[in-house]
Structures are given as C-alpha cells and as structure tokens.
Amino acid sequence: MTKNANSLDQRTFNKLSRLYIIALSTIALSVIISQILIRKHLNDQQSDSTVINVAGRQRMLSQKLTKDLVSLSVEVNLEQRILLKDKIKKTLEIWESSHFALQHGNESLGLPKKNSLKVSKKYKKLNPVFNTINEASKAIMLKIENDPSIRFDAFKTHIEKVKHNEDDFLLMMDDIVNQYDLEADAKVSWLQNLEILLMLLTLLILLGEFLFIFWPTAKTVKATLSELLLAEKRAKKMAFDADELSFAKEKSIKELRALSQAMDETLLFARIRHSGHVIHMGNKFSRLFKFSKFNNDVFFWKVLSIHENEQSAIEALIEKYKKTGWQGEVKATIKNNVDVWLEMAIIPFSLSDEKSELLIIASEITERKTAQLEVNRLTKKSFDEEMSQQKIISSKIIENQEKEQNRIAKDVHDGIGQMLTGLKYNLESIDINNIDKTASKIEHLKALTTDIIKGVRTATFNLTPPELTDHGIVPALSKLTLELAKLTGKNIVFFNKTDFNQRLDSLAEINIYRIVQEAVNNAIKYAESTHIIVSLSHSKHLLSVVIDDNGKGFNPDKVKHVKTGDGGMGMTFMKERIKYIDGRLFLTSEAGKGTRVTLNIPMENN
C-alpha cells in the first residue's frame, strides 16, 4: 500500500469510528439521562413517603402532648408529676424538631430542604398556632422544673391555650398531609409519562442512526475501496521520493558533524545535563581545563575549578538559571592553581519533550579581567590612603582643641575661681554696722560674686570634666546631666540601662562626651525642652547612647545642609566627631513632638 492509500484508509477508519462513537454515545446518553431522571424521581418519592409519615406523626404527637398536659394538670402525686413532665418534654422536643425539619429539611430524618409553594403557604398559616402551643407547653415545663409541687392554677391559662389551639393545629396538619399526598401522586403520574417519552425518544434515535449513520457508512466503505486502489499507484511514486530524501538526509548529517567539529576546536563549548553532569565537552574546553573526554560522569563545576567555594558558586548559578538561561562572568581555577576568567552563557536546549540539556558557550577573558581588577585595586588603595590622611588631620585638630580646652579649664579653675571665692569671703566679713552706707552695696556685691563663680564653674565644667579623665564616660555623663539640671532648673536625667562600666579609648570617650554635651545644650538652648533623658546601653559589639527631649522639635531636612546659624554648625561638629570614631549618628525629630539623637559606637575598635 502506498502512503496515499494508507492515509485514505486511516481517514475512512477514523470517520467510521467517529460515526459509531456518536451512535453509541447517543444511545448511552439517552439511557443515562433516563436512568438519572427515573432515579431522581424515585428518590423524591422515597422522601415523599417519609415526609407524609413525619407529617402524620405530628398530628399524633400534638394529640399526645395535649393529653399529657391535661393529665399533668390533675396529677397530685409529686413523683408521678415529675415523670409525666419528663415524658411531655421529650414529646415536645420530637414534635418541635419534626415541625422545623418538615419546613427546612433534615438529612438524618430523610426530609428534603424545599417544599412546594402551596405547602409553604400552609405552614406559614400553621406556624402561629404551632408557636402558641409550643410556647405554652414550654412555659408549663419551666414552671414545673422550678417548682414540681406548683398548683394547677399557676399554669391553668397555658393549658387552656393548648386545648384551644389543638383542633386548629390538627385541621391544618390534615390539610398539609393531604397536600403532600396529592403532590406525591402527581410525581408518580409524571414519572409514568416520562418513561413513555423516553422510550419513544430512544426508538427515534435508533431510526435516525440507521438513516444518517449506518446506511451512509455502507456507501462510504464502497467508495473507500476504490480510493485505496488509486492510492496504491501513488504509493509507489512516494517510495521513490523517499529514497531521494534519505540521500539528502545523509548529506545534511555529514555537514552537521563537520560544523560540530569546527565548534569544538574554535569555541569553549560544552553540553551538560540539568543535574550538572557533563555530556560532551569541546576540544578547546578540554585542553584548557585538562579534562579527559573518557570521564564523562563528572559534574561540570568540578571541571571548572579545584576550589570548593568556586564550585559551589558555579553549581548555584546553573541550578538557578537552568530553565531561563544566563550570561555573565565566571571565575574558575585550573588544576595547576591558575585563575581563569570566563565570559560564559548558559542556554537551555530541548532535544524532545522529555529530554533537555544545557549548552555552555564561553570565551576566555583572563587578561582583560586581570587588568580590570588591578585598576579597581589601585583606585581603592588611593581612596583608602586619602581617607586615612583625612582621619589623621581630623585627629590632630580634635586633639589640639582638647589640649587647649584643658589648659583654659585649669587656668579658670585654679586662678579666677579661687580669687573670686576669696573675694566672696572677704565681702562677707565686712563690718556692716554702718547700715545706711554699706548694706545695699554689699548685698549687691554678694549676688554679683555668686553669679561670677557660678558662671566660671559652668565654663570650667563645659571644657573638660575631671570625671571623664579619671573615671570614664559613664561618670562623666552622669555628672554632666546632674550639673546642667542644677544650672538650668530643667529635669535632665541619665539612665545607664545595662550597667555599662567599661573604659574606652580616651579619644572615643571625649568625642562621645562632646556629642552628648552638644545634643543636650541644643535641647536646652533651641528646643525649649523641660525634660531631657540621656540613656546608655551596650551589647558585646555596640555601645548606644540616646538623647531624648520633649522640646518643640524641628524638620531635620531644613538643617541637613546648613553650615551656619542655630543648630547647623553644632550638627556638623557632631557628625564629624562620630565619623572619626567609626560610629553612626541618627537624628529623629518632628515639629511639636520632640527630638531623639542616637549614637552607635562599635566596641571592638575600643
């Protein structure tokens, strides 16, 4: 048989298959639909019988409930009354649950969730009567449970309600049961009609299949045989053409092999599985990394490097981009410990739907990369030298400033302070018997002298506190807050949260002290603060100092680039000092909500 004949035979077979499938499917579908409809209505009728039984039982339960309630009203024996009460309560629960289940459905009782419109209307009319009987019965049960010996007169009214509404309930329930019965009969009649209709439909389908499927199929088979004979002739010609195509295919395969060999010799080319195992590695790649082609069961990253960290990096790269592809630079190390840089591309390649590989195409850029790294190293070295020089200059400036302040502080404390103190004592020893001439002048000189001493001491304290040199940063900050609180009358508190008591490098301590001093003075002078808290905490590697105030606050962006004026220069000095000791300074403030200054200083450098 020729190719055309086979194609024609396949088309005929497919057509016949489709027709028979359609015919059989139609019959099967009609049978299935018939069974579904019949089963559905049988199930409905099964639930109908349950509904009618439960609805009929409601009549009996309501009569039993009324009878037991009347018996309860005349029962004088306390024990018998309690037993009768429990019996009534159980009857009431069954009666109530069945009533609601008939309206809303109940799977355990086998009751459907929906009623017909007529039944729903009848229940709507019945519900007030049911509620009256139910509420009266529950009221009687409650009274007897509270007082089993209660007199009949206490629930006589409720008994009368039950007796008065019982007849209405029975009549309405009879009407509902009759309606359920009518609807069940209607469903049976409908089911009988449905069965006749389905039988007629099935016969019609069979007639249609004979006229439109089986008869035309017989004609098609006859025509197909004629076409098959014609197709045989065409097949012979196609066989000749196939031989020609086979020759062309052989030629193409030879050309592809020649191209593959050229790529192996000129490019760093490899094929690997998604798992990383090498499938093929080109000659140039093999020579560069001294890879034996007979050892194919090896991971690609183990070929590229002898170092585990580089192998892990290449493995992670392939795992991450094996589905999307990637291109970039990769560092490798060949077996004689020589660094090699590759500009590499990872290309996903699918041979079939079930088999896929990764193509690796790379070029060596070792010389270019080495030159680039050398340029980066020289640039970084120049930058580090410049920063080191800047640190040395800043250190000398700060060191000279501190020396000058120490000298001034010593002069003020040892010279002017002692002299003014002596002046105060001399003034206090003056004879003031001549009150008219000297009293007012002496009192004025006393106040003036006190102010001078206070100012001198403040200036001395602000320059260099002895606590900082002798005891360290914690006592110095404690003394600073205490003295400033006395001098300004503001509530300034120091809180050592983690009981820090270590000594730091002297330059670190003086810079921390100056920054805190500047921050507190800013809060006093500019923020109009009444409460200032200086808190200190530390961990193994970090010392943290936080200055909080309740002042008017400000917008930090407005003073970020200010070099003069209130706050601007002080902020610049604070930043320069914290930078010198390799710390970090954070400023948080908002108008009307106070200010927080945070210093973080690394401990390992101190």
Image (tube, rainbow, N blue to C red):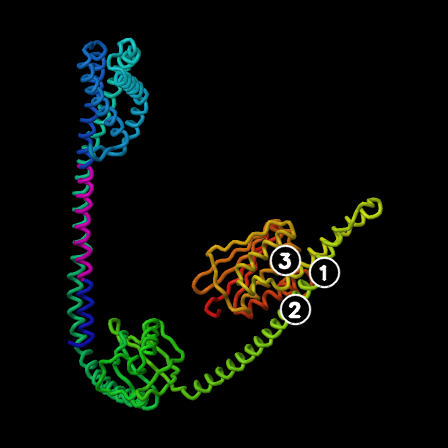
Q: Amino acid at mark 2?
A: Arg
Q: Secondary structure at mark 2?
A: helix
- 20 part of magenta stretch: yes
Estimate the spatial distance between the alpha carbons at disc 2 and disc 3, rounded to whole Å: 22 Å
**Tag 2 residue:** 407
Residue 260 visible to the viewer? no
Categorize mark 1 by other alpha carbons within 10 Å: few (<14), some (14-19), many (20+). Answer: few
Front-most of residues 502 and 11: 502
Mark 2, mark 3: which one is toward the viewer? 2
Categorize mark 2 by other alpha carbons within 10 Å: few (<14), some (14-19), many (20+). Answer: few
Estimate the spatial distance between the alpha carbons at disc 2 and disc 1, rounded to whole Å: 18 Å
Magenta-drawn segment: 16-42
Residue 273 visible to the viewer? yes
Residue lying farthest to the right in this orientation: 437
Q: Amino acid at mark 1?
A: Met
The correct choice, above or below, for 166 with respect to 204 in the image is above
User: Quarter of the image containing the N terminus?
Assistant: bottom left
Please state if 229 lies on the left or on the right of 415 as rendered.
left
Q: Position of residue 344 (x, y in %)?
A: 37, 81
The correct choice, above or below, for 31 with respect to 163 in the image is below
Kindly check if marks 3 and 1 are in contact, taking CB atoms under 8 A apart as contact: no
Q: Position of residue 496 (x, y in %)?
A: 50, 55
Front-most of residues 495 and 52: 495
Q: Secondary structure at mark 3?
A: helix
Q: Position of residue 176 (x, y in %)?
A: 25, 24
Please state if 196 lies on the left or on the right of 256 as rendered.
left
Q: Amino acid at mark 3?
A: Asn
**Tag 3 residue:** 521
Q: Specify the label residue 419 is tagged with.
A: 1
The correct choice, above or below, for 456 with respect to 398 in the image is above
